[in-house]
Amino acid sequence: MSRTKLLFLSADDARRALPMPDAVEAMKQAFAELSAGQAIVPQRIHMPLPHAGGDVLFMPAAGIDAGQISMKIITLFEGNHAKGLPFIHALIVLVDGLDGRPLAIMDGAMITAIRTGAASGAATDLLARANSETVAVFGAGIQAQTQLEAVCAVRPIVRASVFDSNTLAAMEFETEMSERLGIPVTAASSARANLAEADIVCTATTSETPVFDDADLTPGVHINAVGSYKPLVREIPSETVVRARLVVDETTAILEEAGDLLIPINEGLIGPSHICAELGQIVSGDKTGRRNDDEVTLFKSVGIAIQDLAAAGRILTNARRDGLGTELDF
Ligand SMILES: NC(=O)c1ccc[n+]([C@@H]2O[C@H](COP(=O)([O-])OP(=O)(O)OC[C@H]3O[C@@H](n4cnc5c(N)ncnc54)[C@H](O)[C@@H]3O)[C@@H](O)[C@H]2O)c1
C-alpha cells in the first residue's frame, strides 16, 4: 500500500502560491459555483467561548468538480492584541474528495486574509465605478491590508487613506502599505476625513457600531464591508444599508450572521428582499450590479467556506508546481 504524503504550507508559502490577481479570479469562479449550486457548503458552526473572550468557527466545504474537501478551524480572540498575538488564527485541512486522502495542512490565517480581500476585489471589479481612483479603509489590521491590496488589483488606484481608532496601528499601516503598493497611503484624523473624496470604502474593523456617518459618503461610492459576522454587531449605518444596492456573499449566511443587515431588518427599515443579489449571480450575469454612477453599492460578506476551498485548492496546485512547502509522511 502506498504511503500518503501530506504537504505542510506556511503563511509565506500560501502568499507566494496565490498572488492577489489570481485570488480575485478564483473568488469570482468560486462564488459563481456557489450561487449555481455546484458546491456543498453547510452552514458553519459558530462556537462562542465567552469565558475566554473568543469565538471558534468550523467551516467545511466540498466542490463537486474540484474533487476536494476543505475544513477550516478559525479562532478569533479579542484579547490577543494585548498579548502580542494576532486576533485571528486558523488552520485549513485539504482532503481528496474522491478517496478521502489527506492532501495538505495550511496556515489558514493568511489564506483567510487573502481570500477575504480577494472577494472584495471581485466585488469591487464588478460593482465600483470604472474610474474609481481613491480608497478609504477603516481598520488597520491584516484584513484591511488585503482589502486595499485587492482593490488596487482591480482599479487604477492613485491614493488611499486609513482610519483606525488605534492611531499607532493606522500609522504603521500608512508606512507599510505605501511601501508595498507604491501609492500614497495616509492615516486620516477622523472617519469623516477618511471618507472625503473616497470612490471606494473598505470596512475591516472589529467595531460593534457603525464606523462612519452616512452623510459623509460621496455619491456613487462602492463599499466593501467585511468586519461584522454577529447579529448584534455592525460597521455600516442603517441609512447606508437602506439606500445602497446590496450584494452579499451568500444569502442564508448573511441572514443568519450579519448585523449590518439584521439590525435594519429588526428596526423594520428593510426586509430580506433588500438583498439584490449574491456576488456569484453578478459574476454569472444572472443579476445586475451597479445601474448608474450615482448609486451607492454595498458588498457585505461574512466569509464562506467555498472561498477557503477555492484558495487552498489553487495554493496546493501552485505549491506543487513551484516546489513550495514541506512534505510529511502521514
Ligand atoms: N468577511 C470575512 O470573510 C472576514 C474574514 C476574516 C475576518 N473578518 C473580520 O474582519 C475584521 C478585522 O479582522 P482583522 O483580523 O484585521 O482584525 P484586527 O484586530 O487585526 O484589526 C481590526 C482593527 O479594527 C480597528 N477598529 C476597531 N474599531 C474601530 C472603529 N470604530 N474605527 C476604526 N477602526 C476600528 C482596531 O483598532 C484594529 O486595528 C474582524 O471583525 C473579523 O471578524 C471577516
Image (cartoon, helix red, strand yellow):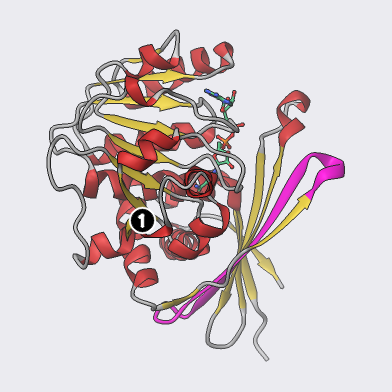
Q: Residue at x 59, y 40 (%)?
A: 233
Q: Nearer the viewer, residue 215 or 330?
A: 215
- Name the spot of residue 173 as percent of width and height, x first: 48, 20
Quarter of the figure with the N terminus: bottom right
Magenta segment includes 95: no
Residue occupying the far right of the picture: 51
Q: Is residue 254 left or right of residue 207?
A: left
Q: Is residue 298 left or right of residue 104?
A: left
Q: Is residue 107 left or right of residue 308?
A: right
Quarter of the figure with the C terminus: bottom right
Residue occupying the far bottom of the picture: 1
Crowding around mark 1 (Cα neighbors within 10 Å: few <14, some 14 to 19, many 20+) is many
Q: Residue at x 29, y 20 (%)?
A: 183
Q: Nearer the viewer, residue 308 or 219?
A: 219
Residue at disc 1, secondary structure: strand
Residue 38 seen in this snapshot = yes
- Name the spot of residue 188 as percent of width and height, x first: 41, 11
- Name the spot of residue 166 as percent of width and height, x first: 59, 16
Q: Nearer the viewer, residue 225 or 38?
A: 225
- Quadrant of the rendered image holding ligand 1: top right
Segment tinted magenta in the rendering: 49-70
Magenta segment includes 58: yes
Q: Give the quadrant of residue 203.
A: top left
Q: Residue at x 22, y 63 (%)?
A: 287
